[in-house]
Image (spheres, rainbow, N blue to C red):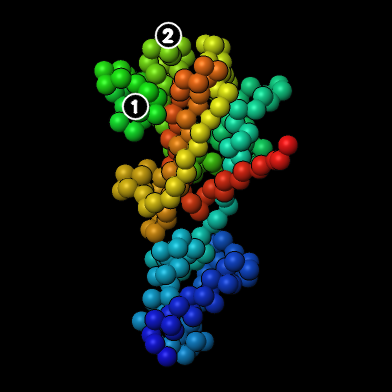
Amino acid sequence: MPRSTLYQQVASELRRTIYSGALGPGDQLPTEAELMLAHQVSRNTVRLALGELVNEGLVTRTPRRGTVVRERRPLLMHPQHELRPRSGETREAFAWAVSQEGRSPGQHIEVAIVRPAEEIASRLELADDEHAVVRRRLRFVDGQPYNTNDSYFPLDLVSDSEIARPGDITRGANRVLEELGHPQVRVVDDIWARMPTSSEADRLQLQQGTPVMVYVRVGYDPSDAPVRVAVSVLPADKHLIRYELESR
């Protein structure tokens, strides 16, 4: 039997034990010697199989414990809920969503005035000499870095508001836009997957082989002018995006 088929078979059986729950987060996989004996294959075949699971983000290798199953508790996201009014709720959408799952949200925020990259400027319909305010956020769940969210706003629109000032906006920037007379009544989402850049991997503390989803949302006010571009980088093993559509 070809060597490639052998290691894929071993990887497939290990993958099934993880997805079935027979091996849970933090559990140790059998040693290389045990896998060689169980599957009657060479050490190199076992290492190729384990390497495939590492690249898929299912397991991680530790110096003392060997190969263990990674923690996989994705944050469930409902993008269609972001602009819904929440009666009596004063927190911004991310903090509210995390808290709904009984988990603890957190974030580190940086605010700057920038001349945005062409992709952002075109989405905001800014002229070449126009600037934007960007609020860069590294978001945490239960103390672990979970995603990044960079929100861009036309400087002329938000220069005198909380959006342009450092610090958290507890009720959320979307609410501030409403107070400025520019509620978002329409949004356009683009989502695609890729491998992370080295800086993203460092900032999000990603394991080797973990892909990310890039989620770009453009919000429009009642005059159909773009007022916000939000760019999120979401590690694929930590997020589940769910859209619910209804026929009316």
Residue 28 x, y percent position in the rendering: 52, 69
Task: Give 23 or 77, whichever is nearer the viewer.
Answer: 77
Q: Does 102 appear above or below 175? A: below
Q: Does 111 appear above or below 104? A: above
Q: Does 41 appear above or below 95? A: below
Q: Which residue is mark 1?
A: 121
User: Regarding mark 1 in the picture, which secondary structure is present there?
Assistant: helix
Q: Which residue is mark 2?
A: 160
For residue 74, side relative to residue 134 (left or right): right
Task: Give 11 or 2, whichever is nearer the viewer.
Answer: 2
Nearer to us: label 1 or label 2: 1
Q: Amino acid at mark 1?
A: Ala
Residue 207 x, y percent position in the rendering: 41, 56
Q: Quadrant of residue 152?
A: top left
Image quarter of the C terminus: top right
Look at 51% across and 33% down and name the residue there. Answer: 188
Is any part of residue 111 visible from this angle?
no
Q: Amino acid at mark 2?
A: Asp
Q: Earlier in the sequence, mark 1 or mark 2?
A: 1
Q: Which mark is residue 142?
A: none
Label 2 crowd bin: few (<14), some (14–19), many (20+), radius 10 Å: few
